[in-house]
Image: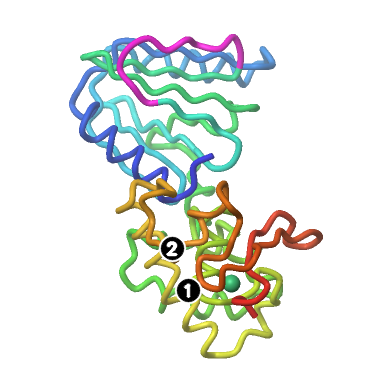
Amino acid sequence: MPELPETELIAEKLRSAALNKRLEDIAFKGGRGNEQEEALASALARLQGCRITDVARYGTFLFLEFEEQGILSLNLAGEVDVQLQRGRLDLPEHNALLLRCQGGFQLLLSAPNLVARVRLLDEEADVDYLTKLGPDPLLDSEVATHLAPALGRRRTHVRAALMQDNLVAGIGPTWADEILFQSRIRPDRLVPELTPQERERLLKNLPKVLDRAVRCQAKPNLLPQNFLTRHRHDDQLCPICGGPLETLEGGSKGALFCPKCQV
Ligand SMILES: [Zn+2]
C-alpha cells in the first residue's frame, strides 16, 4: 500500500530501469467490462511501442510520459498492489495493468476499481484532480511554511488532516502515525487544540520523517531506532519509553501511538 515515500522509491526504480526504453507490451484487465474500461483499454493500447520519455511523481501519483502519446497517470494510494521486477509476472484475470519495457523490466498494478486510478492525459485532459492536491513534502522545500495557514483552517483530528490529499499530498496511515509519534502528538487531538509549539513541531517533522523514510528505502528495519514504524509489525513496544503501543478506535481508527509519549 504505497504512500508518498514508497511511491518515490517506485519512481526512482522506474527512472533507472525504464526511462528512454520502449514499452514492449501493455495489458489492461478491467473488472466490470463496462464502456469506461473498454475506452481506457483502447487508449492504453496506443502506448505499445512508444518510448518512456519522462518519469515524474507528485504525492502518490506516478506520471509516465510517452513520446507524443501523452502522459500515463497512475494513482498508487491505498489498496494497490505494486510489483516491479524483471522476469515473469503473472497477470491477474481482473483489475490489473501490466507494462513491460524493453529489457524485460515490468510494472504490475492490481487494485479493485483500477480504472479510477489510471488515466491517459493528453493536452485536453481534465487535470482538476491534480490541481486540488496540497503541497508535496518531498518536492516543496518550504512545505512547513506553505502548510501552516491551511492546517490552521482544519477542524478534524490531526491524523485525519495529515491524510487529506488536499492539505498535503501523499500521506497515508503509516507515515501519519510516524510524523505524529516523532512530534509527540496524539493522533486524535483536534487541530484547533494544538499549541503553536506543537504545530511548529509537527510541520518541522513532517518533511523530515518522509525524507528519512525514502533514504531508508521505506524498510522498517533500516529506519532509525527511535521510529515507531520499526515496531508496528514487530513487538508493538514504544522505542522511547518501552511501554506498549496502542491502536485507536473511533475517529482515528487504526492509528498506532504511544499513550505515554504522545500527549
Ligand atoms: Zn512511549
Image check: 168 left or right of 62? right
Which one is in front, 163 or 125? Answer: 163
Q: Residue at x 24, y 35 (%)?
A: 15
Which one is in front, 202 or 227? Answer: 227
Q: Amino acid at mark 2?
A: Pro
Q: Position of residue 209 (x, y in %)?
A: 41, 64
Q: Report which quarter residue 135 is drawn in.
A: bottom left
Q: Residue at x 49, y 25 (%)?
A: 109
> For the residue labelled by badge 2, is the local secondary structure a helix, a strand or a loop?
loop
Image check: 206 left or right of 24? right
For the stretch drawn in magenta, the main secondary structure is loop
Instruction: Determine if the magenta segment contains residue 126.
Output: no
> Within the displayed image, which quadrant is ligand 1 positioned in?
bottom right
Q: Quadrant of the C terminus?
A: bottom right
How did the renderer colour the structure?
Answer: rainbow
Q: Position of residue 171 (x, y in %)?
A: 52, 56
Which one is in front, 14 or 202? Answer: 202
Q: Which mark is residue 147?
A: 1
The residue that label 2 is drawn on is: 135
Q: Amino acid at mark 1?
A: Leu
Magenta span of residues: 84-94
User: Cβ–Cβ below 8 Å for labels 2 and 1?
Assistant: yes
Which one is in front, 34 or 200? Answer: 200
Label 2 – label 1 distance at C-alpha: 8 Å
Instruction: Determine if the magenta segment contains residue 87.
Output: yes
> For the residue labelled by badge 1, is the local secondary structure a helix, a strand or a loop?
helix
- Answer yes or no: disc 1 within 8 Å of ligand 1: no
Image height of 88 relative to 51, above or below: above
